[in-house]
Image (spheres, rainbow, N blue to C red):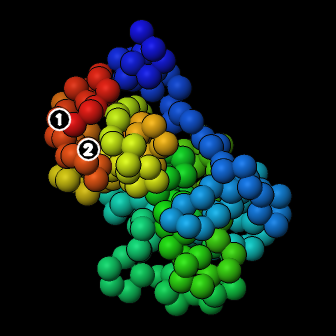
Amino acid sequence: MNRRTFLAAGAVSVAGLSGCLGFGGGSGSKSEEGFETKKQNGEQVPLAPLSVTHKWYKQDKAKFADARGQKQYEMSHIRGAVLSPAPNGQSKNDPISSWPKDQRIVCYCGCPHHLSSMRAAQLLKNGYEKVYVIDEGFWAWHEKGYPIKGQNTSYNPTAYVIDGFADPAFVGETAWARHFETGQKEATDILNDGSYSMHIKFHDVTPDSVITVQTPAYEVEGTIAELSSRVITG
């Protein structure tokens, strides 16, 4: 059994033990501050360490933007952060639109910087000059006991791993997992060999909850338990 098959077969148990897997994953480039970067939509997005972003937070040297969905934001988010979902923010009156272009902005998401990198890349394309993501993601902030706010700030959802393959022709495109009932979503990049891996933490779902996996090549619907127990190939 190869490593990918093992990961898929053991996703529920491994994710439950390990939480959100796979942070890091920079492109090898460095930002001006020396941070690793992730290439996203043609932009090099700086991956700022949790310790640095927390320092900026305490010193009021950055504004924070939650790139997840409404449900996830309502349940728990960094105190003071605005909701600005990936990739383009809120459809009407996105709060970031009123911020100056030289404002330092820190985006974040759950597992750990896919959605946040998409949002950050779009902000960079829109002319914002100082945009970062939290490298380790929201749940690392949560586990440190840093300031959060929401309806259930103590709850840490079970994590699931969904692995799959699409046509390698779609390298650099996005694979999505969506729970349409609550509007929650997660995303990741399709790699050079067509593989992808999503690490999902959705609120108010069970192993029997139905989610939809979407790639440019196919769309698959199934329960979280079923989809995380195999490698999806369409």
Judging by the rendered image, the residue that carries numbered circle 1 is 222
Residue 106's spot in the image, x, y percent? 62, 66
Q: Quadrant of the C terminus?
A: top left
Q: Secondary structure at mark 1?
A: strand
Q: Farthest residue in the top direction?
A: 1
Task: Kindly indicate the quadrant of the structure image that contains residue 144.
Answer: top right
Q: Are marks 2 and 1 in contact (CB under 8 Å)?
A: yes
Q: Which mark is residue 104?
A: none
Q: Is residue 203 visible?
A: no
In the depicted structure, whether residue 111 falls above or below residue 88: above
Give the CA separation, mark 2 to mark 1. Answer: 8 Å
Residue type at tag 2: Val
Q: Quadrant of the N terminus?
A: top left
Judging by the rendered image, the residue that carries numbered circle 2 is 213
Residue 127's spot in the image, x, y percent? 60, 85
Q: Is residue 19 toward the left or the right of residue 184 in the image?
A: right
Mark 2, residues whose alpha carbon is within 10 Å: few (<14), some, or many (≥20)?
many
Callout count: 2
Q: Secondary structure at mark 2?
A: strand
Residue 29's spot in the image, x, y percent? 74, 55
In the depicted structure, whether residue 138 falls above or below residue 101: above
Residue at image position (62%, 55%) is 38
Residue at image position (29%, 22%) is 229
**Depth check, front residue: 233 or 71:** 233
